[in-house]
Image (cartoon, rainbow, N blue to C red):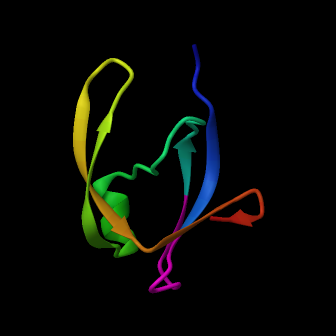
């Protein structure tokens, strides 16, 4: 099974001058966007909480929730 990737633009909603275009893996069942720590730092996002995600194989991982962020794909913003 392969992976589906898309090019998106991420923008710090609190500081619109900080934005990046990156390639991401598309997961149609995802409830959260998961970003590498270096990307979060580069965008200057602030920690606003934590979240635990559970993978299909039963593993779980805890991460930091950061924001605010705008994600643009195919001419649409989320």
In the image, 65 versus 22, the foreground residue is 65
Tell me if residue 40 is in the magenta stretch: no
Q: Quadrant of residue 64?
A: bottom left
**Residue 59 percent location from the top left of the image:** 25, 25
**Residue 17 percent location from the top left of the image:** 51, 85
Residue drawn at (57%, 13%) of the image? 1
Tell me if residue 19 is in the magenta stretch: yes
Q: Is residue 28 above or below residue 2?
A: below
Q: Quadrant of residue 49?
A: bottom left
Left or right, 42 with reference to 19 = left
Which portion, as a residue range, is magenta? Answer: 11-21
**Residue 68 percent location from the top left of the image:** 43, 74
The residue at the far right in this view is 75
Residue drawn at (45%, 49%) of the image? 32
Q: Quadrant of residue 3?
A: top right
Left or right, 77 with reference to 57 = right
Count of numbered tags: 0
For the C terminus, the quadrant is: bottom right
The residue at the far top in this view is 1
Residue drawn at (35%, 73%) of the image? 45
Q: Is residue 24 above or below residue 4?
A: below
Q: Is residue 8 above or below residue 15?
A: above
Left or right, 68 with reference to 70 = left
Residue drawn at (35%, 28%) of the image? 55
């Amino acid at each position: 099974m392969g992976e589906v990737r898309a090019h998106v633009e991420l923008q710090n909603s609190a500081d619109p001058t900080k934005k990046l275009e990156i390639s991401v893996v598309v997961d149609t069942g995802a409830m959260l966007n998961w970003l590498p720590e270096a990307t979060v730092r580069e965008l200057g996002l602030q920690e606003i909480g934590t979240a635990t995600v559970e993978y299909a194989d039963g593993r779980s991982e805890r991460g930091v929730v950061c924001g605010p962020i705008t994600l643009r794909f195919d001419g649409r913003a989320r």
